[in-house]
Image (tube, grey):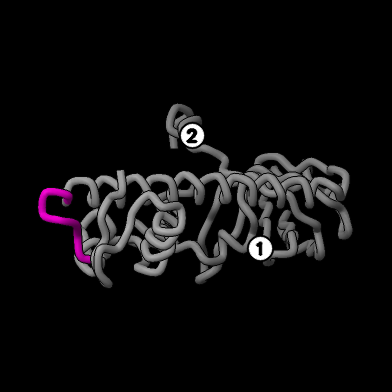
Amino acid sequence: MSEQQFKRNVAYKLRIGDLLIGKPILDKERFSFLELGDKKIVRVNLVANIVDKYEGENAYYSFTLDDGSGQIRLKVFGDNVGKFKELTQGQTVVVIGVLRFFNNEIYISPEIIKEVDTRYLLIRKLEIEKKLNVKKEITNFAIKDKILELIKNSEEQGGIELEKLIMNSSFNKISPDIINKEIQKLLEEGIIFEPRPGKVRWLG
């Protein structure tokens, strides 16, 4: 991998549990990236505790990381061993590294490992949860706007059937339960109404 390509790979801030549910994508037998939702993960930025350290033969170290959501191993080979030999079990660390896949195991080849205060575990957890909540709110706003647009556009026909609204192609990847909840909110807020059961109109 060239230096230019390497710089383009974002080190995603994730929890270990996220990595464990991702799907390894291979090019023939070579690992390309970890597919996680709409992201293609090659490099990661984790905060975790070292719960196990193994020193093997021929310049090899293995560290097991745990952040409360799961466990993953770091593997260090050859010349890199010297950089990380002082790390010990019980330390909390920030790790930036490249994902690898071998023998059906996803692991990390570390570039940087830095000891930090244990409070960073909670800080990182809250940081990631906040991002997820913001993303969820943005998604819900987008769904609400699309529902209103479809209802407004159906006014000339006297409204739209709920089933037709929920099954609209705009919502192909969205659970009907989520759409139903947004419709109920609009009804409760008085933005739309039901002229008859199963049909909704815009109140504007």
The segment highlighted magenta reads 155-161
Looking at the image, which is closer to me, 21 or 59? Answer: 21
Q: Residue at x 19, y 60 (%)?
A: 160
Q: Residue at x 16, y 51 (%)?
A: 154
Looking at the image, which is closer to me, 138 or 81? Answer: 138
Residue, far left: 157
Instruction: Tell me the amino acid under the disc marked 1.
Output: Ile
Q: What whole-number distance in Å separates the C-alpha atoms at marks 2 and 1? A: 22 Å
Q: Name the residue under label 2.
A: 6
Q: What element carries label 2?
A: helix
Q: In which quarter of the image is residue 181?
A: bottom left
Residue, far top: 4
Instruction: From the top left corner, tell me how far across and down residue 132 is, in percent.
Output: 56, 50
Q: Residue at x 26, y 60 (%)?
A: 200
Instruction: Tell me the amino acid under the disc marked 2.
Output: Phe
How dense is the environment of label 1, judged by Cα within 10 Å: few (below 14), some, or many (20 and up)?
many
Q: Mark 1 points at which residue?
A: 72
